[in-house]
Image: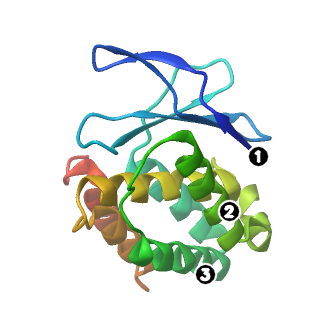
């Protein structure tokens, strides 16, 4: 993984924006972080696969990926989710969203959450653990920056940690609003 000052140009919400940071992974994905409009330090997260259009990540994307990982390696995935949950509980809003702040944020979370412990999970689902750590870090930070009492991210993690998984409850709390 490599994090650098942003260089991706994209028209978002009627504005021409250049990404603040770009996060390149050894696999096929790149994450781009742009200036958001909800608050002064809001960020917009986009990602793309090589040769495909930019996508806005949703909670449902990583939740489904973690469900697949849970089916294959339940305890290892639960340990990963618990580690992310601990970070969610300690997550603070951004005080600044410049490139140095965001690069430091990503680097710190990669260091805190040792992806090598969960490398086996790369064999299941769509996303590699390192990508998930960065994506989830940015999403939880975005959520807390825009609303300090935010709960959706944590609710999805809680649903995934239930002993008796309820896929419909997980889909609902992840943003589908009960529509299938």
Pinpoint residue 59: horizontal percent, then vertical percent: 39, 52
Question: Residue, x 59% and y 69% (percent of image)?
Answer: 71
Q: CA distance from mark 3 to mark 2?
A: 16 Å
Badge 2 element: helix
Residue 164 higher or lower than 1, as above or below = below
Pinpoint residue 70: horizontal percent, then vertical percent: 58, 70
Q: How many marks?
A: 3
Residue carrying label 2: 110
Residue carrying label 3: 79
Q: Is residue 113 visible?
A: no
Q: Earlier in the sequence, mark 1 or mark 3?
A: 1
Q: Is residue 158 visible?
A: yes
Question: Residue, x 44% and y 79% (percent of image)?
Answer: 161
Position of 36 compared to 9: left or right?
left
Q: Are marks 2 and 1 in contact (CB under 8 Å)?
A: yes
Front residue of this view, candidates 162 and 27 = 27
Q: Earlier in the sequence, mark 3 or mark 2?
A: 3
Please tell me the numbered disc located at residue 173.
none
Front residue of this view, candidates 45 and 40 = 40
Quarter location, residue 32: top right
Residue 24 higher or lower than 15, as above or below = below
Q: Are marks 1 and 3 in contact (CB under 8 Å)?
A: no
Pinpoint residue 33: horizontal percent, then vertical percent: 50, 36
Question: Residue, x 67% and y 57% (percent of image)?
Answer: 107
Which coloring applies here? rainbow
Quarter location, residue 122: bottom right
Badge 1 element: loop
Question: Residue, x 26% and y 67% (percent of image)?
Answer: 151
Q: Are marks 3 and 2 in contact (CB under 8 Å)?
A: no
Please tell me the numbered disc located at residue 1.
1
Q: CA distance from mark 2 to mark 1?
A: 10 Å
Residue 83 higher or lower than 65, as above or below = below
């Amino acid at each position: 993984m490599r994090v650098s000052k942003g260089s991706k140009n994209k028209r978002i919400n009627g504005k021409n924006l250049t990404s603040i940071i770009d996060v390149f992974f050894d696999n096929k994905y790149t994450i781009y972080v742009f200036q958001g409009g909800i608050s002064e330090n809001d960020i917009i997260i986009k990602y793309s696969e090589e040769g495909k259009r930019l996508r806005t990540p949703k909670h449902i994307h990583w939740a489904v990926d973690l469900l697949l990982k849970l089916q294959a390696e339940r305890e290892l995935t639960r340990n990963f989710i618990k580690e992310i949950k601990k970070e969610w509980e300690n997550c603070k809003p951004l005080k600044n969203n410049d490139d140095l702040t965001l690069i430091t944020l990503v680097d710190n979370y990669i260091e805190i959450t040792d992806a090598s412990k969960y490398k086996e999970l790369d064999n299941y689902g769509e996303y590699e653990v390192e990508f998930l750590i960065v994506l989830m870090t940015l999403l939880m930070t975005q959520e807390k920056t825009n609303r300090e009492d935010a709960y959706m991210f944590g609710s999805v993690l809680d649903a995934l940690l239930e002993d008796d998984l309820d896929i419909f409850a997980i889909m609902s709390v992840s943003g589908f609003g009960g529509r299938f």
